[in-house]
Image: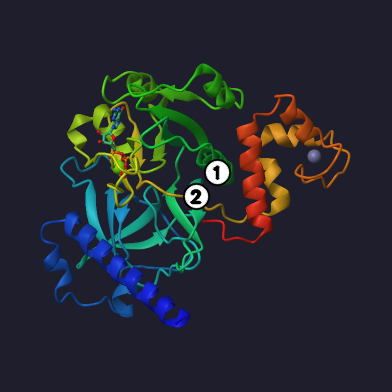
Amino acid sequence: MVKSKGRGRKKRSTARERQWEEKHEASFTHDLARHRRGRPKLSDAALSAAGIEEGTCEPNATVVTHSRRWAFVMLDQDGSQEDQEDTSLCRIDERLREEEESLLAPGDRVQVRFTEDGGLVIAVAPRKTMLMRLGGPHSRIKRQVLAANIDELVIVASVQKPQFSPGLVDRFLIAAQQGGVEPVLCFNKIDLEAPSEEFLSLYKELGIPVYCTSCETGEGIDALEEYLAGKLCVFSGHSGVGKSSILNVMDPELQLVTREVSEATRKGRHTTTAGALYRLHRDIRVIDTPGIRALGLWGLSAEEVSLYFPEIAEQSLQCKFRDCTHIHEKDCAVQEAVEEGRIARARYESYRRIREGIEAQKPEWA
Ligand SMILES: Nc1nc2c(ncn2[C@@H]2O[C@H](COP(=O)(O)OP(=O)(O)OP(=O)(O)O)[C@@H](O)[C@H]2O)c(=O)[nH]1
Ligand SMILES: [Mg+2]
Ligand SMILES: [Zn+2]
């Protein structure tokens, strides 16, 4: 019984993957059929004729979006050929193996070689920064990279529709530190309800820039744009918070698909289905990502959790026990600070939940 359930699930996910591939490959280009039908596989001889060597990468393009076999890339402009196409649909060299970490993500720097068969992604440069999460329970990939080489992680949230989830924001703040990315918080839909100043100070005190926006009135969008000028950033958050809508207001020509939040569940409908990179004015480059339900943290031990909560790490120096968990001990400076309101209870609760989750060895994506 259990076995057949497992098999069923696996099958479904494969079918879903295939659907995803087909949908996105179809949207890459109109004449994709030409690429797919009867195209010979590159032989080893052809690959080596194309000068493919292992282990080196001289990047000349950035990944916009990709499926398992294809990548849509933005080619670096060298200025010598003005009429040169600056985007290209490329095959991914089959010898580039995906191990435990995603092989490609929007924002990845790659080396593309043009052969008589068209563009081929032959190498991926090491990532400088990234937004990463733990792969799903049935996924081959343990570290799912949502965006690569980004400067800023824009955590988009709303007070209601969908309801604010402090736990998710705290997880994003950890993922930003792990990936070497600067976080910024964007409260959208302030026309419906704006967060209180007291609430915002919780994040401002941690040194995190906070922006409040509305796609209905346009309020705050200019200020956010100004902050993001010249940067590569990724928009992430729950489904339905308005990630794609904000980008549409910033650049109406984008015309990204958006969909209403369900009245019944007050949750988004997972409208954006693949991460992709867009170029806006003011030299903003932004990766729009699909809404996520949960952000599983990768490679974090229970003892390390407090290091990612600066206010807890600081207080813990005063705890009686060096290995204090700050959960059940007496004479714990952290719990005392929470009682006295010097550490926000919501932040402490996130700490406790994340830590207890790791200790119970519950899968972190749950
Ligand atoms: N009232 C109000 N509605 C908004 C605002 N921003 C977006 N919406 C609406 O919220 C719904 C969801 O917006 P999307 O942009 O699709 O949300 P998303 O975060 O991209 O969602 P996913 O792609 O599913 O992750 C749409 O109906 C938007 O019109 C806002 O500032 N105020
Ligand atoms: Mg979207
Ligand atoms: Zn303690």
Task: State which image quarter holds ligand 1.
Answer: top left
Element at label 1: helix
Instruction: Specify the quadrant of the image occupied by residue 6.
Output: bottom left
Left or right position of 71 against 104: left
Please state the horizontal and vertical placement of residue 307, each as a whole percent of the image: 70, 42
Left or right position of 172 against 192: right
- Residue type indicated by callout 2: Leu
Please state the horizontal and vertical placement of residue 252, each as a whole percent of the image: 20, 30
* Marked residue nearer the N-terminal end (1 or 2): 1
Q: Is residue 82 above or below residue 339?
A: below
Q: Do tag 1 and tag 2 residues touch (Cβ < 8 Å)?
A: yes
Q: Is mark 2 within 8 Å of ligand 1?
A: no
Please state the horizontal and vertical placement of residue 56, each as a whole percent of the image: 46, 61
The residue to which callout 1 is attached is 171
Q: Quadrant of the N terminus?
A: bottom left
The residue to which callout 2 is attached is 295
Q: Residue at x 61, y 41 (%)?
A: 350
Residue furthest to the right: 320
Q: Residues within 10 Å of mark 1 (few under 14, many from 20)?
A: many
- Residue type indicated by callout 1: Arg
